[in-house]
Image (cartoon, rainbow, N blue to C red):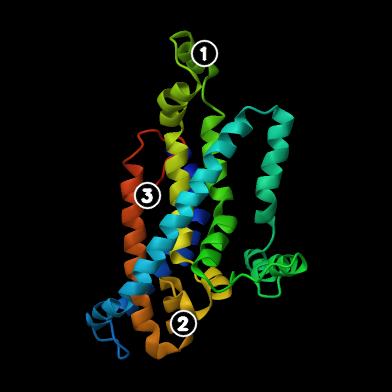
Amino acid sequence: MNKKSFGSRLVAAPYLVWAAIFVIVPLLMMAYFAFTNESGTFTLANISEIGRYKKAFGVSILYAVIATAITLVISYPMAYFMTKMKVSSQRMVMIIVMLPMWMNFLIRTYSWISILANTGLINTFLQSVGLPKLKLINTPGAVILGMVYDFIPYMILPIYSVMSKIDNSLLEAAQDLGSNGPSRLRRVILPLSMPGVISGITMVFVPSVSTFYISQKLGGNKNWLIGDAIEYLFGMGPDYYNVASALSLVLMVMILLCLAIMSRFTDDDEGSVIV
């Protein structure tokens, strides 16, 4: 028993060292800068500065909620129909879903500029058929579109993973009891797939609310998110690290609260959120 316990600790040691160096230490540094000033003296002034960025927080949450809702509406039926395909077809669709994830995130986002720009593919096509140009780039819609495109695999995969493991005998039993298609979806499939839905919502909402590159490239200076504010302050130099750390700390606490709330909506460990 002791040998097994020692072996388990030995195997876990590299992970613990990695977590300590690259997770715990940066978090402690962030907390230190958030509650100190340039001279290292304890202060709450950095936290009080957060009120100046309440609009950025509000816009970030709004965009993240909209992007998450759109992603869910697209992903849920797609995941459902994937489970009805042949195994070979499911694998092919899975590769198609995951294929964009194999490319660099920056390249994927930047490619939308050539599509949405005033001289991009869409406006070029509209001009070729005699229609006026549309203002597509540097708009809230472009930012939300970028979020949906970049993070939709994180919604599809957990929902599909849970749906594919639903026992068909449950659906057959519901059908024998008189349930039609919509009724089976509402009474059987939706409740059983809820762990995947909650996991997908979390995996899309968290990066959406904290993103900055998407808003910079597709939203311009008119769509400033909290991630943009943090990135800008860190780029201003050491004098601004304290306020930037305070914003990062508040954002992290907000995300952890969202994770805790989401995890309460499911009792199933499979596909659920781990806080």
Marks 1 and 3: which is nearer the front? 1
- Split into 4 quadrants, where in the image is the N terminus? top left
Distance (Cα) linking label 3 and label 2: 29 Å
Q: Which label sits on residue 5?
A: none
Task: Decide: few, some or many residues near mark 2? Use Cα within 10 Å; few <14, some 14-19, many ≥20.
Answer: some
Q: Secondary structure at mark 2?
A: helix
Residue 272 position within the rendered picture, expressed as x and y whole percent measured from the top left: 42, 40
Q: Amino acid at mark 2?
A: Tyr
Marks 3 and 2: which is nearer the front? 2
Dot 1 corresponds to which residue?
172
Q: Tell which of 268 and 182 is nearer to you.
A: 182
Residue 70 position within the rendered picture, expressed as x and y whole percent measured from the top left: 49, 50
Q: Tell which of 213 and 66 is nearer to you.
A: 66
Distance (Cα) linking label 1 and label 3: 35 Å
Please tell me whether residue 201 is drawn above or below residue 239 in the rendered image: above
Dot 2 corresponds to which residue?
232
The answer to whether residue 203 of the structure is visible from this angle is no
Marks 2 and 1: which is nearer the front? 1
Q: Secondary structure at mark 1?
A: helix
Q: Tell which of 32 and 224 is nearer to you.
A: 224
Residue 75 position within the rendered picture, expressed as x and y whole percent measured from the top left: 55, 43
Question: Residue at 39% across / 62% down in the picture?
Answer: 62
Q: Is residue 96 left or right of residue 153?
A: right
Dot 3 corresponds to which residue?
275
